[in-house]
Amino acid sequence: MTPSIPSELLLTIFDLAVHTPFDPEVQPLETISSLDDLVIGEPLPSTMASIGATTTSRIHKDDNYPESQLESGIIAHVTNPFTPLDISHVCRDWRLIAFSAPELWSSIYVADGQPSTVHLLRLWLQNSGSRPRDLVFRDTPGVTSGDIFRPSNTIVEMLKVAAAHSKRWRSFKVRLRRGRLWMTNVMEALSGIETHLLEALALGPQFSDVWIRALITGSPQLQELQMWSTMDRSKDFLLAVPFHRLTTITLTMVAFQRDSLFLNSLRRCEVLETLTISLNVGSYWGALQPPSSSDAAVSIPSLRHLNLIGKSALVTCDLLQNLHLPSLVSLSLHTRYYDMQINARHLRNDVYMALEDLFTRSQCHLRSFKIRDEKEGGFEGRLLSILHHPALRDLGELRVGSEVGERALEWLGGGDPTNTPPFQDLKHIHLEAFAADPKILSATVVAMIGLRIRGTGLVAKLRCLTVGFLSETQLIYETRAWNGLVAERGGLGVDKVFYFASNAERTRRLRSEFLYRDFSLIQDW
């Protein structure tokens, strides 16, 4: 007789099954034991030479992820197609548990939809009971012109159904493609909603500022705002935004105007902790300009986390120069260096100079620094230059998405054995693309760790080491060296992950990096 599983444990398993991120392209890491027969030093089919010297330029950016992976219907997580309905089909007992657990149904992600999906949405809303609900409406890029009106009408009908439950909304997010819907019908479907519990709001640029202003005004608990427009032309709209109580702001693919009203409105923020911005190039004329002086920069004393994506060095530099962030502890930057003659570098075109200027002006002390530069040529030198800034002295987490080599590893190890390694409080190191010298096989990563822990006690602080190797041969060699170090030291207490950073793997990780709060930060890139 098969022992029964307690309902409480089953419910925990079900919750993880439907609310955990899912990526079908994730493959189990190949164990080193299966590679032991390979001769170290002999090239494998995928080595540095087969990948190329500029791998980042060849990484595909899926600007429509996760919509590009979706099918029409309803799911419970932004990337997970497994739903409570799938659980209910297993057996009667599981169905009873699933249908009596409102927590499994309170996160509702709607994509496109067929007429039958309307009934499905009613079922989800019914099963979610009285719990606060998180609703996300989006469409997939695969609808053909012949089907354009049917899913559009279905979405409008589903919005009407959802509107009847607006009193229980905790988050409401709508991102629909231009030209796919008559927005007057959408806003009419949402008329009369009551959003007293709404904490998070995300709306695409098609909604009128008058309609959004009314929705925001009627949401006294609103703390998180996500938009695809700065609304720089609408002073009345910006006056209605409760900047004083917003903790999180996300702006996707936006371009700030000269004397930006939105940027200046950030001065009203009192509790803002996280600001995420992906920058569109926009038009240079009338675009944001550097402040007249450092004192004129927009100061946000409460801001602790800044996530910034900019494919244009000019607009990225201009934004960085307009900010003063004295409490900043975490910075994530995705950029593309604009290569110019050394004598032409200045704050308007050199992101690294603009970063140093921001750090110096703000007098901040970062605990986490993540950087990815699509211009990999010369990146290692630029990285080492910025890592020397005093603002990074107390760094606890370092993540580098671009290619680095032995020079960076030697510096992280302290270089000369008599030197003290930098970043004494470093707990997490993640290098996504380590390129070793293909002519000289050496365990550079393990040597760096050995230098950091020699008689200093730093190993007690290091908790996680993740390295993606551009060479499978190097991966095998480093893994064996690590095992030897562990055997010698008797365990390091470090969570180590070594993997082969193929183009496919780097593409997958980049795609996940751009996914932020249910949407892609580079949609329509």
Image: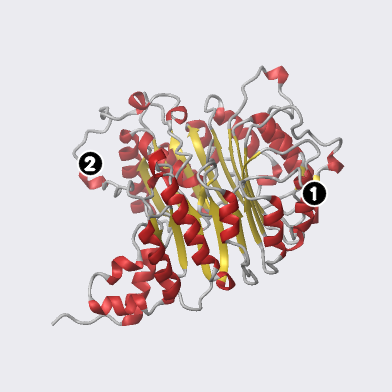
Residue found at x 29% / y 69%: 87
- Bin the neighbour count of mark 2 within 10 Å (Cα to Cα): few under 14, some 14-19, many 20 and up: few
Q: Which residue is the site of mark 1?
A: 235
Q: Which residue is the site of mark 2?
A: 35
In this orientation, which residue lies closer to the viewer: 45 or 106? 106
Displayed quadrant of residue 386: top right
Residue 330, image x and y in percent?
63, 51
Q: Is residue 281 visible?
A: yes
Q: Is residue 446 visible?
A: no
Labels 1 & 2 near each other (Cβ < 8 A):
no
Residue found at x 74% / y 41%: 358
Q: Is residue 407 left or right of residue 143?
A: right
Q: Is residue 148 left or right of residue 33?
A: right
Q: Quadrant of the C terminus?
A: top right
Q: Kindly state the secondary structure of the residue where label 2 is placed.
A: helix
Residue found at x 47% / y 31%: 405
